[in-house]
């Protein structure tokens, strides 16, 4: 392959041959029904998947996303290929592109290919451009040569081409060393401590100031949005001084789609931070939405250096590359069995040298790289739950996580997610013990669910095994290096070695921890051969669930009420409680002894040792003591009464008929009670905002009461400020809503046929939403071939092997593609323009009638509660359809049982119409036809 002119090799119109650079590898584009194979001399062959699978065994093709191609060819073990995504990851580390030929072309500034033949040629052009970029890098990126050399020696197909581009092809000069460039920590700077930040001031942000800052952010060239200015003005109330302790200035603000709420709240939040010299935490629901919010802050801080100083993205430890875990694998890159390891670590090393923050999930680490290299070689390098040894680690002062924590103290804006914010609050503060004074919760309609997850407890096989691993470390060397799973004894050995009482406490913990489930507990439960009191208890949980749960033979997850409990379950609970008491005692004793040392040696302890002791105390409390205490409370309630604020149940979690976890679960009936107590009451001000915060806009007081109940505002001393700014869009003319009346919703063939015909009528740009994964899979299997034959690519969550954010990027990059997904896709889609012009929902999204919902339904209002949740889900899905003033879209519900009292989910002026499928198809084609003007 040569670095030829990227504009050469155009596909001549009407010709089956293509002029290409000298002797490139063939190009393969794999579909479900047919495969395009562009030979090295420019011939286009159309193959069946079976023929292509045979051909790739003889000749490695050039592809885009080899793993996806392998799945379509049913090559589960993969195949050798020149994957242009690997070359992109090497050449442009910490840079994203959608993993498709069009996505690659867009990232590299090439014209968008239309036909499959043009896409094949584009892959060659992309390759040439990337190799040219490497030629330019060869003089300024010394590490690239060493990494490329090591990867080439390990069998990386791109190795020779990359080495040639880097000027290493002629054998002149000193060759790189094997493993050179992999020791990324040597190039990383260290963080440094600063004096404690002063107490924040209490200067207010006035409404006029917020409007002025917004105008600065928008600039003179931006279109005028009066609703956005009104919103910025209204939410500035959250940035006023607090009048009474425990009574924050809470604002509930609903901003319709198109208002521009993100910049609307950034304006007053940034002003408050600058005035008062303290950070404002901006929280959103998912880690991928954090990335989008971080991008919006480029308007506020267009200079990268300033933004790095003033904006920090914070996530949980499990999202970041752990340098210690990475370094322990580096010696293997020169070993005899190091081929895949050396290639994967080489691409991780390229990324790690360029990453902004070390964030591997939703940051600048491409999601498709996890699929290409495997989770163990990518996300497996992140910090496991509680594994960190803090200042005892040789990389502590270069740690990405520690840098992030310290930068967040001095930043203006911290971009976080609801889960992290709530867990920190539940534990009494961040890792440094501090809690923010001001919050913005975007996607505020998810706060209830986030609180539900954060303030819950689970006594299950998986949770017990995780705690056992944290306490005991690796008990087997199978599956890789045991050193990465460091037990409590190893993590604390330097701290406790000279203290007999602490050493005794650690040994007591190690002895007591064996009561927890061990490796292989699944198999032992299946064989009715439990080991220890915890596994014995779980066996009785499983027995009671299978005995009492309806539909136990259908393969789905199962649950059962705890009362009345079998005698064997009560006996097992009592025995396990006694065993956990023996574990909890030395855990609390060790924490007490660590605190005593901090006090007794206050004058002698160096800073690193003090930090290690404080970190050990926090991790003991958060990772073990809180959890074991909650478990004991849950076990005692089996023989007594469950406290009325909680709901307990037994469950067996299953996937495709296979048990994956067994346990006893506890949730708050109303999780906004601890949300209000731990997050809002200590804060001085907070904004909770969403496009779908209220249930039925225009319904008056009852509408806002529902919003207050779902956000925790109802549990605060003072009433919140309410604000609503309607969408500027004309939904009545821009959208159509159809409810199909002539489908048998239980018939998968009819539902699949309807989805297929709707997707064809829209010409792609279609999203299919499902309330159950099994129905999604059933429809996918029936429609993927006919859609491909019509030239429409079908993407699917749970089937395509990539994360949701990557799927959505692929959907966005391919404007005529179609996507099937469940609620995670519904919540993550933000695709303006024709790339999303139709949404088909398989059923009315009623709440799942599980035991947790049963308790909440009784507490919050029975049928009215069900209908409120369902309307909110419909509103959220409909809201994805129109993102710009010139968008238009069709929303179709394939469920004739949709009651008219749920029509309030749709905007004023949008009238759902009950029609047959044929009529809906005809109107969809007409309404979405290019060039059609918007009409009422």
Image (cartoon, helix red, strand yellow):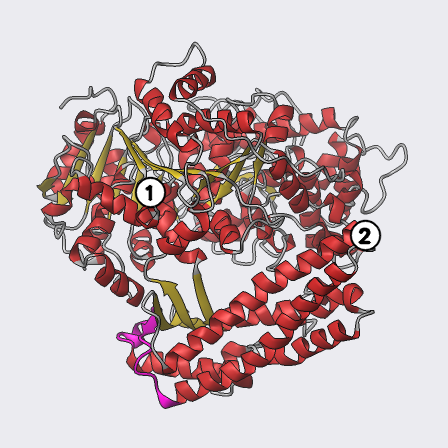
Tell me if I can see residue 519 in this picture.
yes
Q: Viewer-nearest of labels 1 and 2?
A: 1
Q: Residue at x 66, y 67 (%)?
A: 592
In this view of the protein, which residue sits in the foreground, 224 or 436?
A: 436
Q: Is residue 854 above or below residue 710?
A: below
Name the main secondary structure of what is drawn in magenta: loop
- The circle on residue 731 is none
Q: Which image quarter holds the C terminus? A: top left
Name the side, left or right, on which 413 lies relative to 833.
right
Name the side, left or right, on which 136 lies relative to 379.
right
- The circle on residue 718 is 1
Would you say the residues marked 1 and 2 are in contact, meaning their CB atoms lie under 8 Å apart?
Answer: no
Q: Which image quarter holds the N terminus? A: top right
Query: In the orientation shown, which residue stands out farthest toward the top?
Result: 220
The magenta region covers 549-567
Q: State the SS at label 1.
A: loop
């Amino acid at each position: 392959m040569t670095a030829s002119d990227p504009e050469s090799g155009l596909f001549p119109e009407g010709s089956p041959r293509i002029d290409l650079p000298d002797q490139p590898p063939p190009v393969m584009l794999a579909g479900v029904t047919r495969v395009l194979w562009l030979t090295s001399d420019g011939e286009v062959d159309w193959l069946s998947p079976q023929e292509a699978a045979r051909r790739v065994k003889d000749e490695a093709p050039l592809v885009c996303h080899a793993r996806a191609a392998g799945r379509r060819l049913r090559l589960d073990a993969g195949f050798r290929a020149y994957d242009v995504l690997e070359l992109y990851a090497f050449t442009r580390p910490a840079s994203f592109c959608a993993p498709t030929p069009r996505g690659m072309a867009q990232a590299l500034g090439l014209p968008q290919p239309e036909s499959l033949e043009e896409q094949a040629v584009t892959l060659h052009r992309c390759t040439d451009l990337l190799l040219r970029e490497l030629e330019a890098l060869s003089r300024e990126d010394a590490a690239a040569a060493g990494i490329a050399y090591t990867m080439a020696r390990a069998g990386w197909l791109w190795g020779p081409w990359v080495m040639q581009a880097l000027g290493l092809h002629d054998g002149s000069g000193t060759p790189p060393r094997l493993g050179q460039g992999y020791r990324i920590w040597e190039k990383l700077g260290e963080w440094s401590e600063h004096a404690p930040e002063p107490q924040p001031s209490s200067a207010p942000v006035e409404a006029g100031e917020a409007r002025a800052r917004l105008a600065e952010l928008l600039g003179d060239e931006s279109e005028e949005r009066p609703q956005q200015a009104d919103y910025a003005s209204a939410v500035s109330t959250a940035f006023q001084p607090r009048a009474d302790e425990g009574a924050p200035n809470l604002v509930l603000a609903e901003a319709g789609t198109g208002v521009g709420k993100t910049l609307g709240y950034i304006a007053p939040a940034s002003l408050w931070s600058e005035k008062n010299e303290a950070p404002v935490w901006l929280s959103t629901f998912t880690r991928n939405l954090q990335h989008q919010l971080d991008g919006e802050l480029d308007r506020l801080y267009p200079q990268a250096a300033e933004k790095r100083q003033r904006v920090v993205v914070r996530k949980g430890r499990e999202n970041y590359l752990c340098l210690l875990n990475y370094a322990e694998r580096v010696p293997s890159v020169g070993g005899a069995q190091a081929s895949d390891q050396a290639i994967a670590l080489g691409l991780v090393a390229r990324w790690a040298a360029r990453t902004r923050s070390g964030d591997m999930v939703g940051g600048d680490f491409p999601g498709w790289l996890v699929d290409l290299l495997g989770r163990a070689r990518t996300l497996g390098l992140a910090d496991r739950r509680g594994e960190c040894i803090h200042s005892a680690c040789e990389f502590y002062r270069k740690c990405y996580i520690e840098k992030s924590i310290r930068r967040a103290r001095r930043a203006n804006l911290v971009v976080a997610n609801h889960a992290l914010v709530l867990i920190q609050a539940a534990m009494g503060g961040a890792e440094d013990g501090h809690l923010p004074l001001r919050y913005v919760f975007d996607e505020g309609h998810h706060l209830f669910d986030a609180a539900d997850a954060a303030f819950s407890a689970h006594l299950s096989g998986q949770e017990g095994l995780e705690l056992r691993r944290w306490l005991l470390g690796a008990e087997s060397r199978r599956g890789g290096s045991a050193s990465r799973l460091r037990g409590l004894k190893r993590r604390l050995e330097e701290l406790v070695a000279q203290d007999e009482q602490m050493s005794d406490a650690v040994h007591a913990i190690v002895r007591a921890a064996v009561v927890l489930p061990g490796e292989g507990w699944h198999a032992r439960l299946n064989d009715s051969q439990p080991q220890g009191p915890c596994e014995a208890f779980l066996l009785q949980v499983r027995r009671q669930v299978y005995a009492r749960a309806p539909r136990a033979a259908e393969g789905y997850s199962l649950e059962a009420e705890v009362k009345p409990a079998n005698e064997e379950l009560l006996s097992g609970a009592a025995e396990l409680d006694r065993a956990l008491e023996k574990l909890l005692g030395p855990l609390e004793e060790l924490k007490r002894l660590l605190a005593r040392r901090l006090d007794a040696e206050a004058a002698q302890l160096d800073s690193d040792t003090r930090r290690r002791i404080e970190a050990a105390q926090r991790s003991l409390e958060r990772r073990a003591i809180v959890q074991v205490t909650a478990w004991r409370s849950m076990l005692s309630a089996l023989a007594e009464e469950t406290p009325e604020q909680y709901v307990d149940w037994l469950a067996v979690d299953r996937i495709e008929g296979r048990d994956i976890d067994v346990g006893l679960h506890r949730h708050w009936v109303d999780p906004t009670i601890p949300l209000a107590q731990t997050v809002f009451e200590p804060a001085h001000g907070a904004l909770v905002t969403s496009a779908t915060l209220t249930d039925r806009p225009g319904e008056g007081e009852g509408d806002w009461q529902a919003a207050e109940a779902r956000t925790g505002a109802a549990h605060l001393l003072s009433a919140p400020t309410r604000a609503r700014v309607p969408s500027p869009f004309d939904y009545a003319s821009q959208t159509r809503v159809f409810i199909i009346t002539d489908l048998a919703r239980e018939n998968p063939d009819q539902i699949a046929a309807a989805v297929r015909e709707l997707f064809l009528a829209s010409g792609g740009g279609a999203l299919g939403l499902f309330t159950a994964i099994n129905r999604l899979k059933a429809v996918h299997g029936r429609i993927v071939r006919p859609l491909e034959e019509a030239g429409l690519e079908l993407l699917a969550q749970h089937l395509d092997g990539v994360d949701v954010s990557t799927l959505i990027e692929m959907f966005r990059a391919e404007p005529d593609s179609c996507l099937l997904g469940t609620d995670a896709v519904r919540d993550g889609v933000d695709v303006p323009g024709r790339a999303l012009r139709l949404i088909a929902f398989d059923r009315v999204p009623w709440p799942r009638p599980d035991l947790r919902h049963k308790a909440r339904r009784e507490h919050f209002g029975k049928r009215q509660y069900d209908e409120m949740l369902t309307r909110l889900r419909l509103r959220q899905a409909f809201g994805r359809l129109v993102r710009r003033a010139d968008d238009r879209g069709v929303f179709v519900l394939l469920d004739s049982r949709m009651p008219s009292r749920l029509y309030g989910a749709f905007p004023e002026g949008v009238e759902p119409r009950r029609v047959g499928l044929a009529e809906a198809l005809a109107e969809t084609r007409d309404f979405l036809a290019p060039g059609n003007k918007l009409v009422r």
